[in-house]
Image (cartoon, rainbow, N blue to C red):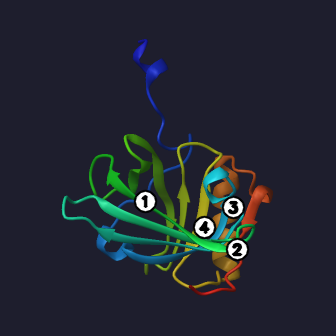
Amino acid sequence: MMMGLFSCATIPKGAVAVKPFDKEKYLGQWYEIARLDFKFERNLNNTTATYSLNDDGTIKVDNQGYNTKKEEWTQAIGKAKFIGEDTIAKLKVSFFGPFFSGYNVIALDEEYKYAMVAGKNLKYLWILSRETQLPKNIKNNYLKIAEDIGYNTSDLLWVEHNKQQ
């Protein structure tokens, strides 16, 4: 009975990870369209995430963005691994050694062009696209899904894509 008090949630209550999920189709570059801002991405625009397979079966996460305060490009490389089956888009990601956090694809179109990712709680949310723009119908649909889960979508930071490395 006490075990529940110590368990680490990896997905917000009410959010459901996409299944079936095809990790091969998800690999490649994504543009960050919107996010709930947090310290590791503060002041970043032109942000991208590129996913590739590591030899050990984990997924390499290569995040890049342009820091508007420092006026320089930054990069963070981490790894993600599935929590359970790789046909369910419920992963944990680490950029700092043994510390992992939830990475859950909670919305994804059939062609793997647009995705919405929830972190471990309502403080983390990303909307991603294979292009620098998001169609209005996808945007509205994803915002509704996020709001239904409990996210305050008015806090989303909409990322500019106006520079290339």
Residue 78 appears in view: yes
Residue 18, disc: 1
Q: Amino acid at mark 1?
A: Val
Give the residue at the far right of this rendering: 154
Spatial distance from mark 1 to mark 3, Cα to Cα? 16 Å
Which residue matches tag 2? Answer: 71
Residue 127, disc: 4
Q: Amino acid at mark 4?
A: Ile
Q: Amino acid at mark 2?
A: Glu
Residue 20 appears in view: no
Which residue matches tag 3? Answer: 144
Viewer-nearest residue: 74 or 122: 74
- Circle 2 or circle 1, nearest the eye: 2
The total of numbered circles placed on residues is: 4
Q: Earlier in the sequence, mark 2 or mark 1?
A: 1
- Circle 4 or circle 3, nearest the eye: 4
Image point (56%, 40%), residue name: 13
Disc 3 residue crowd, few under 14, some 14–19, many 20+, Cα 10 Å: some
Mark 1: which secondary structure? Answer: loop
Quadrant assignment, res 61: bottom left
Spatial distance from mark 2 to mark 3, Cα to Cα? 34 Å
Q: Earlier in the sequence, mark 1 or mark 3?
A: 1
Q: Amino acid at mark 3?
A: Lys
